Image (cartoon, rainbow, N blue to C red):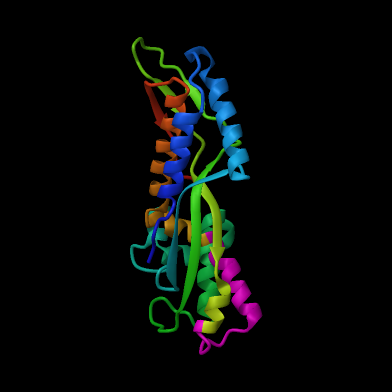
Amino acid sequence: MKFFVGTAVLTGLILFAVFLWPKPDLAVHEQTVSAATTRLKAVLGSAKLSTAQGIWHLVFPFDFFSSDGPFDRTFGKSWQVLATQSLKQLTPAERNVVELYRWGRAHGFDPEHGRRFVVIPVLARAGVDLNQSPTPIQNSLPHRETVIKLPPVRLTDLIILEEENSQAFPEVPLTPAQWRTLIELVQPCVGLILKDRGLGEEAREGALKFYRAVYAAAGVKEAHFETSVDF
């Protein structure tokens, strides 16, 4: 289950950018954008601008290790294949997945034949780092709009509500230390699942909408914005 609750906040920030920031000559629009983001950081009290957020209830191990699941699509190979390989052969992201799988199997969480599971509530936000400046790239051809490379979209917050797990699943024979280990192993893998479920794209669209408004307020009406999802 998920829901996004950042739309109203983002809309307010965009209106703040459009109506309250000055509109200078085009020659100084980059300075204006820089001043605007500095002002926004002061308003937010942080350099992290979250453009999408939501709550998910992830079922471990089944949401993590399913046929044609998020890990398969991310790595281009099944997690079953990854699990047969030496950790030294794997990338850090692949290693995180394999370590989580092996820990789960060792503690009775079998994604293929078992029935034991826990539900892990996750609060996540994604957006951009305002400390990273957009980079204008001028086209060499005449009458072409400016391309502006934006900071990548990343997870800005990830909170796993581990306290709820031990209370909701008392029949799962895990010690408090084992619960903490599970949460530590789950955390670096959650981003791939949330990206697969649309958080990255939602945040990317929100970031594009925000920066278009900022640059329009700075006098840039014709520009193409690019960014990527990096989590």
* Up-down relation of residue 1 to residue 173 (above or below): above
* Up-down relation of residue 230 to residue 38 (above or below): below
Please tell me which residue is depicted at 40% across the width and 56% down the height of the picture: 4
**Viewer-proximal residue, 4 or 128?**
4
Name the spot of residue 167 as percent of width and height, x first.
54, 83
Residue 53: tell me if it is visible.
Answer: yes
- For this orientation, the residue located farthest to the top is 142
Name the spot of residue 182 as percent of width and height, x first.
57, 73
**Viewer-proximal residue, 218 or 120?**
218
- Magenta span: predominant SS is helix
Name the spot of residue 83 as percent of width and height, x first.
48, 67
Q: Quadrant of the N terminus?
A: bottom left
User: Is residue 175 a member of the stretch shown in magenta?
Assistant: yes
Please tell me which residue is depicted at 59% across the width and 58% down the height of the picture: 88
**Viewer-proximal residue, 231 or 208?**
208
* Up-down relation of residue 6 to residue 67 (above or below): above
